[in-house]
Image (cartoon, rainbow, N blue to C red):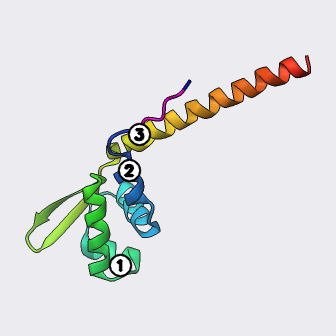
Amino acid sequence: MVFWVTPANAHFVFRALSDPTRRAIFEQLTRQGEQTVHALTHYAGVSQPAVSKHLTVLKRAKLVRHRREGRETHYRAQPEALAPMVDWLNLYGAFWRDQFDQLENLLKRVDP
């Protein structure tokens, strides 16, 4: 039997990545490495204030970190912050494996 346990920060990670623009920003930082807000604004195709709001949500979920260098703010991805989501998906996967095993056992009993 699988118990439904939600890993502590999974909610924040799922919420942060539920938006396609935030997912795209996170993927860009993961693939290309550290980037400035200006570069992310150019990539995302939305306004700088919109990118800043998206980055705030990603920071709250601990998916990105930032550092200041002069007037520029540089952001980098923190892929290890995906761990709560991976843990949640593993729990969900275990649930479905168990369900399919039960179905297989039932089918074997019905039609040997």
Q: Residue at x 37, y 55 (%)?
A: 30
Q: Residue 72, how many percent across, how many down? A: 15, 72
Q: Quick one: quadrant of the N terminus?
A: top right
**Above/below status of 3 relative to 55:** above
Q: Among all residues in the image, which is located at the extreme bottom? A: 47
Q: CA distance from mark 2 to mark 1?
A: 29 Å
Q: Dot 3, how many residues are within 10 Å of its Cα: few (below 14), some (14-19), or many (20+)? A: some
Q: Residue at x 32, y 69 (%)?
A: 54
Name the kind of residue labelled 2 in the image: His
Q: Residue at x 42, y 53 (%)?
A: 14
Tell me which numbered mark, 1 or 3, is placed earlier along the sequence: 3
Tell me which numbered mark, 3 or 2, is placed earlier along the sequence: 3
Q: Among all residues in the image, which is located at the extreme right? A: 111
Name the kind of residue labelled 3 in the image: Thr
Q: Which residue is mark 3?
A: 6
The magenta span reads 2-6
Query: Would residue 3 be counted in the magenta stretch?
Result: yes
Give the main secondary structure, helix, strand or loop, of the magenta stretch. loop
Q: Dot 2, how many residues are within 10 Å of its Cα: few (below 14), some (14-19), or many (20+)? A: some
Q: Which residue is mark 1?
A: 42
Query: Would residue 92 be counted in the magenta stretch?
Result: no
Say which element carries label 1: helix
Q: Residue 16, how many percent across, how many down? A: 37, 59
Q: Horizontally, is 110 left or right of 93 in the view?
A: right
Q: Quadrant of residue 87?
A: top left
Q: Quick one: quadrant of the C terminus?
A: top right
Q: Which residue is mark 2?
A: 11
Q: Residue 70, how many percent across, how many down? A: 8, 70
